[in-house]
Amino acid sequence: MQNILSRLDALREKLHDEAFLSNKGLSNEVGLYVFAYRPDEEMPVRHFLHSIAASENGQNGACRVIAYDLYDLLLDICRERRILDRIAQMEAQHGADFMLRQIQRVAPPEAYIERMKYPDHQTGDVVMISGVGRVFPYMRSHNILNNLQHVFDDVPVVLFYPGDYNGQTLTLFEAFMDDNYYRAFNLI
């Protein structure tokens, strides 16, 4: 297996590939990609995402990077619903299972997707989604992928996944079976 830095360099090169940026060569499939990495490689991946999104305000040569962190979206949803400051107290009073159900009710996949929508998709846009491990178990990545394929059917979407993806099965942190997902492609 390639080391993470060479894989991230290969991804950086992919962001200049016209076929990738225009969603061509996928047999009419939606351009959903998974960039799986070992959980202990989280910090280099975060640094890469920060630098790629910050470069010229997301302009990366041939593409425009639209970056979303699922954890930040979850915090925004909880703030909007005015529960963020009460989460620790509710968990202490009612337990972790209660809190899991409440957060999943307040922040279903559709709430994340609604915050990711943007009106001016352009050829050359690449949507990058991170924070999968930080929102577990409140949100599962296969739920995000299932719900965004109709929103981003014209631009490539890259899900950064701390675990394994074999083209069929997502295994978070190389330990938790997330679910089967057949519509995404391994990116690198």
Image (cartoon, rainbow, N blue to C red):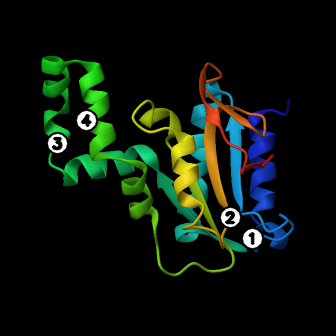
Graded by Cα atoms within 10 Å as few (under 14), some (14 to 19) or many (20 or more), the crowding at tag 4 reads some
Nearest the eye: 118 or 142: 142
Q: Which residue is mark 2?
A: 156
Element type at mark 4: helix
> Which dot, 4 or 2, sits closer to the camera?
4
Q: CA distance from mark 2 to mark 3?
A: 33 Å
First in sequence, mark 1 or 2: give its number. 1
Query: Contact (CB < 8 A) between labels 2 and 3?
Result: no
Residue 176 drawn above or below residue 75: above
SS label for mark 2 = loop
In the image, which is nearer the foreground, mark 1 or mark 3? 3
Do tag 3 and tag 4 residues touch (Cβ < 8 Å)?
A: yes
What residue sits right under mark 1 in the picture? 21
Residue mark closest to the camera, 3 vs 4 = 4
Please tell me which residue is depicted at 70% across the width and 44% down the height of the picture: 35
Q: What kind of residue is marked 3? A: Ile
Residue tagged 3: 83
Residue occupying image coordinates x 74% and y 46%: 8
- The percent position of residue 79, horizontal first and vertical second, equals 21, 49
Name the kind of residue labelled 4 in the image.
Answer: Gln
Three-letter amino acid code at the position of disc 2: Pro
Viewport quadrant of the N terminus: top right
